[in-house]
């Protein structure tokens, strides 16, 4: 590809800002048969940084990385420097490790950044960098088997959500019977003209053939009889956000047992 054309494409690409770096994509989707994706990384800091890349199951712990034999994705450039405002393209490869073929699989790409001095070293404490800290950015990697060809967004209607009362608080419980992951955020319920947000979680994604619970610590019993609407935002393969609203059915309230109360107190 001619250099001028490549530069033009880089300018037009949308970037997702995460910590001090910006990425050309917010997630990577590997369809069956694909073994490689490229990710453009830009250093939006006014100083150079060291970037380390690795894939794991979501722990995001540099000191406790999964062994390479247990991870299906790897970066061809696991560690590199980026000058201020510099961009770099990296390749993330699928090593063709066997994956489930009846549902999607999800992993996380970690981008760990450390501020550097102009000489490529970590800055001394008596410099302007002394307040800078290392930061870790994570984006999702999905493997989609051959049997799953449709857009996951078209399957959202199969998601079954109900409002349930635990021993001490209300929660939205979503049952995903599909083989797709649903990327969900901004979960809230609206009742009696007010909005009650779900408790923030590090990852609000709903896994295939699984339940996901969203606690509602601020939702009072007094508004339940007025009708409840579930509102949430879903994110598609391209990182686009879509707002949803649906009537939320209320599950029968079960009288809590002593075991339920103790379990709730332990949380």
Image (cartoon, rainbow, N blue to C red):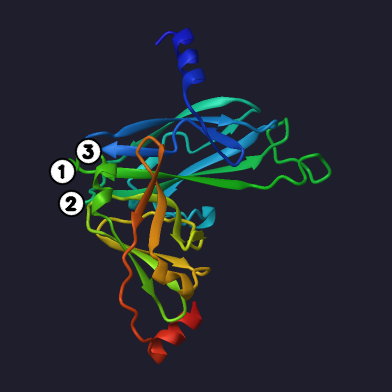
Quick one: label 3, few (<14), some, or many (20+) residues within 10 Å?
A: some
- For the residue labelled by badge 1, is the local secondary structure a helix, a strand or a loop? loop
Q: Is residue 76 left or right of residue 70?
A: right
- Name which residue lies at 41% across and 53% down: 231
Percent position of residue 129, x then y: 76, 41
* Residue 131 visible, this orientation: yes
* Residue 59 numbered tag: none
For the residues labelled 3 and 1, the Cα–Cα distance comes to 9 Å
Check whether the beta carbons of the residues at disc 2 and disc 1 lie within 8 A of each other: yes
Quick one: label 2, few (<14), some, or many (20+) residues within 10 Å?
A: some
- For the residue labelled by badge 2, is the local secondary structure a helix, a strand or a loop? loop
**Split into 4 quadrants, where in the image is the N terminus?**
top left
N-term-proximal mark, 3 vs 1? 3
Percent position of residue 191, x then y: 45, 62
Percent position of residue 206, x then y: 34, 56
Q: Residue furthest left?
A: 147
- For the residue labelled by badge 3, is the local secondary structure a helix, a strand or a loop? loop
* Residue 68 visible, this orientation: no
Residue identified by numbered label 3: 32
**Quarter occupied by residue 43:** top right
- Name which residue lies at 35% across and 36% down: 93
Residue identified by numbered label 2: 102
For the residues labelled 2 and 1, the Cα–Cα distance comes to 7 Å
For the residues labelled 3 and 2, the Cα–Cα distance comes to 12 Å
Residue identified by numbered label 1: 147
N-term-proximal mark, 3 vs 2? 3
- Name which residue lies at 31% across and 77% down: 252
Would you place residue 151 above or below residue 69 in this image? Answer: above
Percent position of residue 67, x then y: 40, 53
N-term-proximal mark, 2 vs 1? 2
Check whether the beta carbons of the residues at disc 3 and disc 1 lie within 8 A of each other: no
Q: Is residue 123 left or right of residue 44?
A: right
């Amino acid at each position: 590809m001619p250099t001028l054309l490549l530069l033009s494409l880089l300018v037009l690409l949308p970037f997702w800002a995460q910590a001090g770096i910006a990425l050309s994509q917010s997630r990577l989707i590997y369809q069956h048969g694909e073994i490689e994706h490229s990710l453009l990384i830009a250093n939006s800091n006014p100083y150079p940084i060291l970037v380390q890349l690795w894939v794991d199951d979501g722990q995001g712990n540099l000191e406790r990385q999964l062994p390479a034999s247990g991870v299906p994705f790897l970066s061809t450039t696991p560690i590199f420097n980026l000058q201020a405002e510099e961009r770099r393209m990296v390749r993330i490869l699928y090593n063709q490790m066997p994956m489930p073929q009846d549902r999607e699989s999800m992993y996380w790409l970690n981008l760990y950044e450390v501020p550097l001095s102009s000489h490529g070293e970590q800055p001394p404490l008596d410099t302007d960098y002394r307040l800078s800290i290392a930061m870790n950015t994570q984006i999702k990697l999905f493997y989609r088997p051959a049997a799953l060809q449709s857009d996951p967004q078209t399957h959202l209607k199969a998601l079954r959500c109900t409002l349930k009362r635990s021993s001490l608080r209300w929660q939205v419980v979503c049952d995903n019977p599909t083989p797709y992951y649903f990327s969900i955020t901004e979960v809230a319920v609206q009742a009696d003209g007010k909005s009650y947000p779900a408790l923030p979680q590090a990852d609000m994604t709903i896994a295939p053939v699984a339940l996901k619970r969203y606690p509602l610590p601020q939702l009072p019993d007094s508004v339940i009889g007025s009708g409840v609407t579930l509102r949430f935002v879903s994110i598609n393969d391209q990182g686009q956000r879509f707002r949803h609203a649906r009537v939320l059915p209320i599950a029968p309230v079960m009288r809590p047992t002593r075991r339920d109360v103790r379990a709730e107190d332990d949380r």
